[in-house]
Image: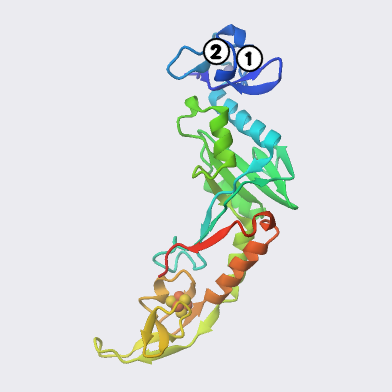
Amino acid sequence: MKNLKVPFGLHIPSGKIVDVHSVELGARCNCTCPACGANLIAKLNHKTPHFAHKSECLVNGGLETSIHKAAKQILAEEKQIWLPDYSYAIADPRLTQYWSEGIEVKFTNAIHVDSVRLEVPIGTIIPDAILEYKGREIAIEVEVFNPINETKRKEYAKRALSAIRIDLSKKPHALTLDQIRKIIQEADERKHWIYNNRISELIREARKRATEKQIVYHKSHKWPYPLPHVQNCPLKIRQHEASFFANVKLDCRRCKYATLVEIKRVRCAEDEANKAIQKFLVSDLIPAVAGTASFIFMSDP
Ligand code: SF4
Ligand SMILES: [Zn+2]
């Protein structure tokens, strides 16, 4: 069935997307459907006030289109976004048990971007918007009924283009312009990185520069054979007298910094990971928020 209700209308006199609370009742709202162009009536005396088509929406997806247009209008006019949190693990996800744990980057204010371009095709994809900030680009995808799939994520990675998705799928009928503005411009869990090119580059570099650790064998009271340990584990996980070490099987195998763990070999990127964090802080994507981005270790192995 074609959807007749839309939360936003295209206000004819101003040419802007408006929400139902800012117009007059009924046909006096002076709005058309942002998707099909048909006249709308404002149903203000309703539990969830909304716009309705007089007859029917002439295209499918009127609801989706009106939300996309509302988000794009806010981005293009106000040029502000609060970047979503970013968490990552240096370790290869196939290698460690707790691969999803890592380092989390949190931003503490919105950034003002230099420009916003709407619906510019990039190869096979057309992001809703491309923000330009200090010479770098970030694509924006608004999600209502069509979740971003893996193919799209791979396409962004292939093109080395950072991308963020804004999830507006929760109760889309009831969204207001003000709510969408807050989701975009304030810290909100409905924004996620689809792909972050800068941090992916840094992780790749850090992995390459991981260093081989020396393995030593320590006698154990519990086992009849000596156990492989890494001497001087930078995380200082275990201590014996004055020295620190890590157990290859129990610690390195689940460590977010391990890039290779075999019984006689461990490659560890702990030092490089910290350099990567520093680089990320001063990288050209972040300078305006340097000092306002905080880096926390979500959990230590
Ligand atoms: S991989 Fe982790 S546990 Fe092992 S030595 Fe490096 S930091 Fe320590
Ligand atoms: Zn319509």
283 vs 254, left or right, is: right
Compute the Cα span from label 1 to label 2. Answer: 8 Å
Q: Decide: is 293 above or below 72.
A: below
Q: Decide: is 37 above or below 301.
A: above
* Residue 46, quarter of the rendered image: top left
> Residue 55: where, in percent of width, then height?
54, 9
Mark 2: secondary structure: strand
Q: Amino acid at mark 2?
A: Ala
Query: On the image, numbered disc 2 is attached to which residue?
Result: 42
Q: Quadrant location of the C terminus?
A: bottom left
Q: Which label was assigned to residue 225?
A: none
Give me the residue at 39% from left, 66% from top.
97
In the image shown, does 225 or 48 lie closer to the viewer? 48
In the image shown, does 215 or 60 lie closer to the viewer? 215
Q: Earlier in the sequence, mark 1 or mark 2?
A: 1
Query: On the image, numbered disc 1 is attached to which residue?
Result: 31
In the image shown, does 165 or 290 lie closer to the viewer? 290
Q: Does the beta carbon at disc 1 come under 8 Å from ligand 2?
A: no
Label pair 1/2, CB-CB below 8 angstroms: yes
Instruction: Kindly tell me whether residue 207 is visible in this rendering.
Output: no
Q: Amino acid at mark 1?
A: Cys
Mark 1: secondary structure: strand
Give me the residue at 44% from left, 63% from top.
99
Give me the residue at 51% from left, 28% from top.
175
Ligand 1's quadrant: bottom left
